[in-house]
Amino acid sequence: MHWAYQIAERLIQKYPTKEVFTCASGISPSGSVHIGNFREIVTTFFVVKALESMGKKTRFIFSWDDFDRLRKVPQNVASSYERYIGMPYSDVPNPFGKGSYASHFEKEFEHSLLAFDIEPQFIYQNIEYRSGRYIQFIRTALKKRLEIYDILMRFKSSSPIKEERATFYPITLYCHVCNKDTTTINSFNAELEIFEYECTCGNKGSQALSDSNNIKLNWKVDWAMRWMVEDVVFEPGGRDHSSATGSYNVSKVIAKEIFDYKAPDYAAYEFIGLKGTNQKMSSSSGNVITPNELLNVYTPELILFMFAKYNPNAAFNIGLDEDVLRNYSEYERYLSSYIQGLLKDEHLIHSLKLAGANRSMKQPNFRQPNFSQVASIFSLIGFNTDLLHTSLSQTGEKYTIEEITRISHRVAHWMNDWNPNRLVSINDEKNTLYYNSLPELQQEKVKQLADLLAFEPTLSGDALMKNIYAICHQDDKKRMREYQKDLFRNVYQLVMNENSGPRLPLLISAVGREKIIELLTFS
């Protein structure tokens, strides 16, 4: 059974009377949300879809942890922003325009999710905290602060320190003057619920808990509290949160002992790598590919399929090299078999469904050209979509401009930005040097092909290919295949200085019969 359906079944068995299954994910808007972070939300998305397919009502929430502090300035943000370190993301100015730092990166990611039809309920934690919604739970955490300290120390190798325990507070208090978290709480009157604090900026003061909109629970307490508030039954987390002493196991105990709530079901997910590196993607390091950037190369359903087919605890790399051709070819093959009802692998069938392949089945006229086919000729015709449309039509492949554009734009971006070695062009002049280096028999085959094109101008598609194969006909099948291989290689060399290329009917249609004849004629 597919992993998402396994989780869904486990949730149904665990909560048999639950009317609404709340599934959560969340990210801190520390910079551009990358495709590794995307696994956080897409894992939850797949479990939600699996639950819904089983007839269950769901609530899919996504928390923006934008009341967290700015910890580090990413490479694509001016170093002058270091002066804002310690302030909530929601209060740091947008380095790229109007609004806040948080809203810029939040809206960037939210917009990219629309392409995948992923539409969770977004919760902005700076709004929730400042609205006073969590005051009663902050009060609980403060009353039980020593118990929280003891829980935290259970997961550490060091011994508790009496003085540290006495001054421990499970909260962050942003200074009213500098708006940074560089404050120290000197005392808390539990009866009057008043803090005395001082900040490194020089500010000193007191404030009542009931009037506070500048207090945030520390991460592991905050996570446990929000599970309870939102009644979360499932939330994934990264491998770094999943160790024996990681955030999930700590928060799990805090949820039970402090907030009297059973922690949600959990799935640990592995990190996504970039092909050719062993580095974890990180917004602050600049080693990132965002969903928007990936959408320039891959269709939304193919991206979802790549994530759906791997268990969350399986690491994999995102390839933007020759892997693109392999990934498209694999997806196109599976989708075709699925639409025809020929695919038998249940895991792949569920992966395709979760990726949105059902939309293709509901649109019986849905078609799009093969990615590698378009890639084989698009640069030859100067990335001209109209010429591509004509070339495909002449080989019997009928597509609308819209269907072609959906793939051709991605082919062009992939070649120009990620794989320029794939850029090829038609030879301006005859490659006489290469032709003269060929054995006489191979020269004769080239001449026969040029004559075929000249004297049979109406042949195209499969009929043309049949006649091309006939040029190399031999009773000895092995020798015939060698002749065919030699002829194709020689044509590609003489036309475009490459050892391989598109199917000859498509190449002839794209380049033009007269130009091909000219480049293949040497007498």
Image (tube, helix red, strand yellow):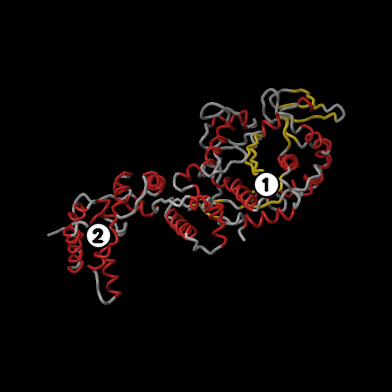
Tag 2–tag 1 contact (CB < 8 Å): no
Disc 1 marks which residue? 57
Of residues 457 and 179, the one drawn nearer to the viewer in this rendering = 457
Q: Residue furthest right?
A: 191
Give residue 87's position: percent from left, percent from top.
64, 30
Q: Residue furthest left?
A: 523
Distance between mark 2 and mark 1 Cα atoms: 60 Å
Disc 2 marks which residue? 491
What residue appears at the point 69 percent right and 31 percent down from the top-left corner?
181
Quarter that holds the N terminus: bottom right
Inspect the image, locate mark 1, and give the three-letter code of the amino acid beneath it: Lys
Q: Is residue 222 visible in the rendered structure shown here?
A: yes
Task: Specify whether 211 is left or right of 311.
Answer: right
Tell me the mark number nearer the camera, choosing from 2 and 1. 1
Of residues 122 and 274, the one drawn nearer to the viewer in this rendering = 122
**In the rendered structure, which disc, 2 or 1, sits on the residue that comes first in sequence?**
1
Q: Tell me if residue 239 comes above or below residue 345 in the rendering.
A: above
Quarter that holds the C terminus: bottom left
Q: Tell me if residue 89 comes above or below residue 351 in the rendering.
A: above
Which element type, helix, strand or loop, lies under badge 2?
Answer: helix
